[in-house]
Image (cartoon, rainbow, N blue to C red):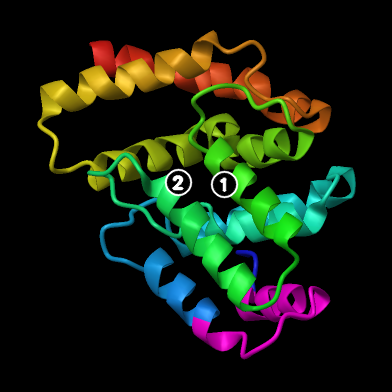
Amino acid sequence: MPAPARDLWADWIRLWRRERLRGPAAPCFDALLARYSEPARAYHNRTHLAKMLAQFDAVRAQAQRPEAVEWALWFHDAVYDARRGDNEAQSAAWAARELEAAGAKRDLAAAVVRLILATRHAAAPAEPDARMLCDLDLSILGAPPAEFAAYDRAIRIEYAWVDEAAYRRGRAGVLRAFLLRRPLFHFPDLRAKLEAQARINLQNALHGLEA
C-alpha cells in the first residue's frame, strides 16, 4: 500500500508559525508550489520536495539549526531551469526576500542563503548543516536501483533540449565527479544507509552512458 501523500501545507504553516512570521503564509506557499509543479520538472518537483522533507524528519535532531535547514529545503529548488546556471543563486535570493519581508531574523535568512548555495554541489561544504542538506539532496543517488533508474530518466527529460551525444558527455562528467568524492555522504547515518548503493548506481549509470 503506497504511503499517504505528505500534507505540505501543514508542514509549511507549522514552520511559518514556529518562526512567528508576520503576514499571510499562503501567498508564498502557493508561489512555491506553483514553481515545483512546473511541467518541465520531471524530477525537481513536488515529489522531490516532499521526499526531502520526510527524510529530514529522520535526521532533524542532528541539525544545528533545524529551522534554517527546513527553510532551505523548501527553497533549494524554488527556481529551476535546466538551461541556466544560476538556479541556486536565484532560489537563495527568493528565500531571503520572503523571509526578510515576513520579519524573520536576519541571521536566519543569511543561514538559509548559505545552505541553498551549498546545493550547487561544487565542493564538499564545511558547515555541518550544509553537509546535511547536501546529503539529503543527493540521497536519490543511493536509492534502490529501480528508483534511481526512474530518477535518471527524469533528469534526461529535464534536459530534453540537449542532443544525445552532448548529454551523455555532460551527464557522465557529473556522475564521475560524484564517484570521486570520498565520502559521498557526510552524515554517518546517511552514509551507512546510502553510500554503497550510490556507488553501484553511479557505476551502472556511467557504464550505460559510455556504452
Going by the numbered disc 1, the residue's amino acid type is Ile
Q: Residue at x 26, y 39 (%)?
A: 156
Tell me if 95 is positioned left or right of 45 in this view: right
The residue sitting at the right extreme is: 61
Where does label 1 land, which residue? 116
Q: Residue at x 39, y 57 (%)?
A: 79
Between 134 and 23, the residue placed more toward the observer is 23
Specify the segment rendered in magenta.
Answer: 7-27
Mark 2 or mark 1, which has the lower sequence index?
A: 2
Where does label 2 land, which residue? 88
In which quadrant will I find the C terminus? top left
Classify mark 1: residues with Cα within 10 Å, few (<14), some (14-19) or many (20+).
many
Please determine whether, in this image, residue 86 is positioned above or below residue 180.
below
Residue 37: x %, y % from top left: 38, 69
Tell me if 207 is positioned left or right of 48 in this view: left
Between 47 and 24, the residue placed more toward the observer is 24
Please determine whether, in this image, residue 99 is positioned above or below residue 203.
below
The answer to whether the residue labelled 2 contacts the one labelled 1, judged by CB atoms less than 8 Å apart, is: yes
Tell me if 38 is positioned left or right of 148 in this view: left
- Kindly report the secondary structure that dominates the magenta region of the rendered protein: helix
Please determine whether, in this image, residue 165 is positioned above or below residue 189.
above
Q: Residue at x 23, y 17 (%)?
A: 169
SS of the residue under disc 2: helix
Residue 75's label in the rendered image is none
Which quarter of the figure has residue 195?
top right
Between 153 and 146, the residue placed more toward the observer is 153
Is residue 70 at least partly visible in the picture?
A: yes
Q: Is residue 208 magenta?
A: no
Whole-number angstrom distance, CA of label 2 to CA of label 1: 6 Å
Going by the numbered disc 2, the residue's amino acid type is Glu
SS of the residue under disc 1: helix
